[in-house]
Amino acid sequence: MKMNRMMSGVAAVAAMMVMAGCSAKASAKSGNTASGNTVKIGMNMELSGAAAGYGQQMKQGFQLAVKQINAQGGIKVNGKKMKIKTVIQDNKSTTSGSASVTAQLATKEGVVAIVGPATTNDGTAAIPNETKAEVAGVSPSATDPDYTLQKNGKVQDYVFRACFENNFQGETAAHFVTNTIKAKNVAVIADNSSDYGTGLAKAFKQAYKGNIVSTQYFQEGDKDFNALVTAIKNKKVDAIYAPGYYSEVGLIIKQARQAGIKAPIVGSDGMADPKLSQIAGKANANKVYYTTPFSSKSGASNKMAAKFMKDFKAEYGSDAPTFSALAYDSVLMIKQAIQDAKSTNSVKIAKALAKIKNMPAVTGAMTINKHHDPEKPIMIEEVENGAVVSATAVK
Amino acid sequence: MHTFFQQTLNGLSLGSIYALLALGYTMVYGIIKLINFAHGDVYMLGAFWGYYVINTYHVNFLVALVSAMVVTALAGMLIEYLAYRPLRNSPRITALITAIGVSYFLENGMSFLFGANTRNFPQAITQHNYDVFGITVSNIQILILVTSLVLMVLLQLIIQKTKMGTAMRAVAVDPEAAALVGINPDHVISFTFGLGSALAGAGGVLIGLYYNSIDPLMGMTPGIKAFVAAVVGGIGSIPGAAIGGFLIGLLETATQAVGLSAYKDAAVYVVLIVILVLLPTGLLGKNVKEKV
């Protein structure tokens, strides 16, 4: 179904042109403002299609955050407590869907802020309508460095994210591979079908000073990596850098270990999920490291993370994945911004989002920098025998 | 040299699954000239059924495999009955578009009912690795190859030696003439869908066990590659589909082995284009008499 992507790209352009007409707002009244006792927050999320697995996890984190805030009475705005009302819409993992969902949320539903989308591609498609409606969007997981920037390098006024951008994670991994693993020869296996995988691989290659003996690519949804790992086995590498999501990297770990490759496998926060070890198999998930803002060990140093993990398990009966934590934090960012702005006006919320400082969050206390990227501590987790054995904070 | 044989083995294991899927495409096309794009999703259904019975009833692998084949056979017949039979006399493009619709329905229906997240397939058989002259062979790879070959031989026997097989071949050549001699084409078509879907279901369980990972969209890419395999082998030809499947598996592995992993899917589609230009009927497609 390779055609679909091209078709949906064309459809996205067409849809945006159509939408441009209906999402333009009268300039007299800027942005959306909540009325009554509720404040509407939208979610533009990949709930079906290729990225649905991750989107569903984010929806869980989003709903848990809203439920907890409402249980405490809501968000305090000028002495008045307002409950959150959610509007969750599915963009079907398509750029055209993302653009139209944004228009729906921002103009028809009149939300004051939006959480999502999950991927950089879908997120970028949402920007024109967010900007036109003057409603901020906080993506839990769009990692491309340029996502929050305009073409001329200026920051996008209404675009924020809760996750690290690629360069930061790629550089951290490169330093780790050089200084801690002391690897001289590294193979890179990257997800070619997302900006996430290619962006991280690029950032890693730029920052890593050693020898990169081989760079291989795979597609989202691939299941067979035997040919890749057999080729790498011959090259006698000291480490493998495999930025990608747990569904594919889990299989890479499994197949590499079964082929007899013992070198450490280093990756990114897309792997920080209990499913990684389940897919790889407990016996195979050894000497696996990844950079992440959130880990199942976070609870030891971060009280909020401990509470979040407990509540998440009570609510959904499974361990909290990183994507849920990031979506949870996206809601906290919006809540913080509404409180700081002392207003539910979407323009003022966007301005307050840019000024968030040291906000306590599940993925670590965060400060929004001038590029609208969060600055928060990054950790490197180590997996041995299918369990996370350590999480080391790095600078 | 070791690497070469290791990669060949990798290619054969991958190819045997494409071959199982390609057989279903080719059989259905041989009889009603329909490219059943939902075929890859039937393979996904088989994998999910295997997941379900092994996890819930703790059955052994063989029971899971056979029950998945029965369930997917029924699913295939049901799809044919509900979606394609009403369109039997419509233009071919109508049925083709319906097939794409059925495919989307199955993918998104399963995502909706069971979640889109990747699941780890229960390991009903523990993997062991054997070293044969320096080549690592796992028991699961052997199982996949043997099961696929056994199923292909069985299929060939059914088509060549049984009454139903004769009827299938008759309908493939001329449905009206077959009806005149007392064959009910509806029964034959239904049986063909069942047979093809059973093979896809078996492929799904084998893949689940081999890779330990299943999701509702898992049938998409293998489905298309199996379609390419069927075209390369000569769509409508049973041995052609099997050969095409192995060829595509080997080709994909070879592309990755020489370091062009980014182009592995492209290589498969380039082969499709080349075959369509040079040999429009595929490698074994000329053999009209054998069409089933």
Image: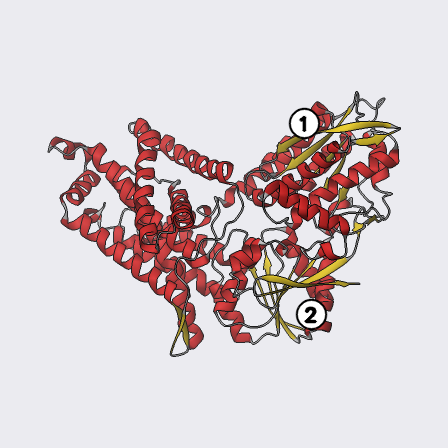
Tag 2: residue type? Answer: Val
Camera-side residue of A100 and A286: A286
Tag 1: residue type? Answer: Gln
Name the residue tied to disc 2: A177
Q: For numbered disc 1, what is the local secondary structure? A: helix
Residue A89: where, in percent of width, then height? 63, 32
Camera-side residue of A291 and A37: A37
B228 with respect to A216 (left or right)? left
On the question of residue B235 being in view, the answer is no
On the question of residue B103 being in view, the answer is yes
The label number, if any, that marks residue A104 in the structure image: 1
Q: Earlier in the sequence, mark 2 or mark 1?
A: 1
Write the residue at 21% across / 40% down: B172
Residue A255: where, in percent of width, then height? 49, 64
| Residue at mark 2 shares a chain with residue at mark 1 | yes
Write the residue at 68% across / 73% down: A181
The chain letter under disc 2 is A
In the rendered view, tell whether residue A46 sits above or below residue A389.
above
Write the residue at 54% across / 63% down: A253
Q: For numbered disc 2, what is the local secondary structure? A: helix
Camera-side residue of B261 and A349: A349
The chain letter under disc 1 is A
Residue B248: where, in percent of width, then height? 39, 57
Camera-side residue of B254 and A42: A42
Residue B286: where, in percent of width, then height? 24, 50
